[in-house]
Image: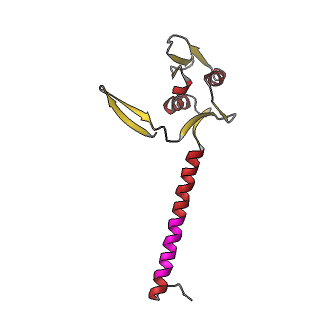
């Protein structure tokens, strides 16, 4: 997880970096990205999870055969990676968390790779120049 740890009124919490790569929850069998709570609820119900309606601020799911409880914020926009990993841990082999590549993240990675390539080429050219100038090494200069 990336972000900044914020200490406020005796409570420490992680504020996720909005510029970091976004995470998405993926249903492994169908390779479908979970885009809403309706889709998630359907997938969880197929796995035996039942919805609890006790807390109006949370969506909660319980599985009768276990003591596990999944608690999610009612607003899907507040659905974060920590909630996704909670679902993954409680449903092994059914869900996974993946990076959602935005164009911004792809361009940043490409520019980093290109800079690395340029540095390697520059290092190689300096290496050849030094060995040609001083006339030793395995490089023969014309």
What residue range appears in magenta? 118-129
Residue placed most toward the observer, 68 or 110:
110
Residue placed most toward the observer, 140 or 44:
140
Q: What is the magenta segment's predominant secondary structure?
A: helix
Residue at 53% in and 41% down: 21
Colour pattern: secondary structure
Residue placed most toward the observer, 100 or 49:
100
| Residue at the outermost left position | 10
Residue at 53% in and 19% down: 74
| Residue at the outermost top position | 54
Residue 124 forms part of the magenta stretch: yes
Residue 57 forms part of the magenta stretch: no
- Picture quarter with the C terminus: bottom right
Q: Quadrant of residue 5?
A: top left
x and y, in percent, of residue 87 in the image? 55, 28
Residue at 60% in and 45% down: 103
| Residue at the outermost right position | 30
x and y, in percent, of residue 37 in the image? 61, 23
Residue at 46% in and 86% down: 133
Horizontal arrangement in the rendering, residue 48 relative to residue 120 (left or right): right
x and y, in percent, of residue 39 in the image? 65, 24
Tally the marks: 0
x and y, in percent, of residue 34 in the image? 63, 30
């Amino acid at each position: 997880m990336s972000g900044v740890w914020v200490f406020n009124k005796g409570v420490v919490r992680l504020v996720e970096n909005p510029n970091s790569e976004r995470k998405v929850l993926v249903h492994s069998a169908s390779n479908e990205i979970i885009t809403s709570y309706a889709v998630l609820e359907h997938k969880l119900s197929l796995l035996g999870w039942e919805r609890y309606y006790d807390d109006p601020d949370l969506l909660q799911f319980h599985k009768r055969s276990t003591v596990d409880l999944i608690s999610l914020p009612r607003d899907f926009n507040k659905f974060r990676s920590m909630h996704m990993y909670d679902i993954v841990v409680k449903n092994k082999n059914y869900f996974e968390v993946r990076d959602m590549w935005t164009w911004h993240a792809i361009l940043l990675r490409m520019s980093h790779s290109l800079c690395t390539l340029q540095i390697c080429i520059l290092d190689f050219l300096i290496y050849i120049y030094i060995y040609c100038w001083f006339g030793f090494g395995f490089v023969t200069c014309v």
